[in-house]
Amino acid sequence: MNIKQKKAADLFIESGDGYSALIGAGYSERYARAYDSFFGKTEIRDYIGKKLMEKSCMNESDEVIQYLFRVMRGEEKETELVKGKNEKGEIVYDSVESPMSGTLRMKAAELLCKRYGLYKEKTENTRDTPVVIREDM
C-alpha cells in the first residue's frame, strides 16, 4: 500500500465519504467517481478495518479510565443485596446502593497512577554484589 492510498484510507475513516477521501488524497475526479473499486481492494479494506478497530479500542480504554476516575472520586455506587424478612416472615432480598468502599477507591487510584506513570512498584535488587573482606595487617 502506497502513501497516497493510506492517505485516502485515513481520510475515508475521518469523513466516511469515499469520493472526497480520494479527491483529498490527490486522485482525479474521474477515478474518485469509481471509489467502490478503490475501497473494494482487500489491502485497503483490511487497513481501514484495522484502523477502525484501533480507534474503537482507544475509545473503550478512555471509557475505562473515566470509570476509574469516577470510582476514585466516589461518584460511582455499588449495589449490595441485603437479606431481610417481610411481614409474613419470609426471607427476601433487597438491593441497596452505597458508595464504593475505600478499598475499591484506593485500588482505582493505584491503577490510575500506574497508567500515568506516577506510581512505580519497588523492585528488589537482584544484582550480586561481591563482598570484599580486607584483613588489617
Image (cartoon, rainbow, N blue to C red):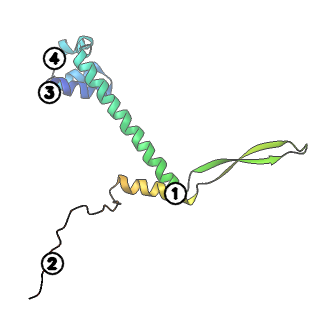
Q: Mark 3: few, some, or many residues within 10 Å (few <14, many ≥20)?
A: few
Residue beneath disc 1: 105
Seen at 86% across and 42% down, the residue is: 90
Please give left or right for residue 135 compared with residue 9 in the image.
Answer: left
Residue 70 location, x and y as percent? 51, 52
Crowding near pointer 2: few (<14 within 10 Å), some, many (20+)? few
Separation of disc 1 and disc 3 at Cα? Answer: 47 Å
Give the CA separation, mark 4 to mark 2: 81 Å
Front residue (pair 11, 88): 88
Report how far apart the C-alphas of labels 2 and 1 lie in the structure: 50 Å
Residue 28, numbered label: 4
| In the foreground, 100 or 127 | 127
Q: Distance between the residues labelled 4 and 1?
A: 57 Å
Q: Name the residue carrying label 2.
A: 133
In the rendered structure, which disc, 4 or 1, sits on the residue that comes first in sequence? 4
Inspect the image, locate mark 4, and give the three-letter code of the amino acid beneath it: Ser
Where's residue 38, x and y in %?
A: 22, 14
Q: Is residue 14 visible?
A: no
Q: Position of residue 52 (x, y in %)?
A: 33, 29
| Of callouts 3 and 4, the N-terminal one | 3
Q: Residue 3 carries which label?
A: 3
Mark 4 vs mark 2: give the one in front: 2
Residue shown at 76% from the left, 43% from the top:
93
- Under mark 1, the amino acid is Arg
Badge 2 amino acid: Ile
Q: Do the residues labelled 4 and 2 touch (CB within 8 Å)?
A: no
Amino acid type indicated by mark 3 = Ile
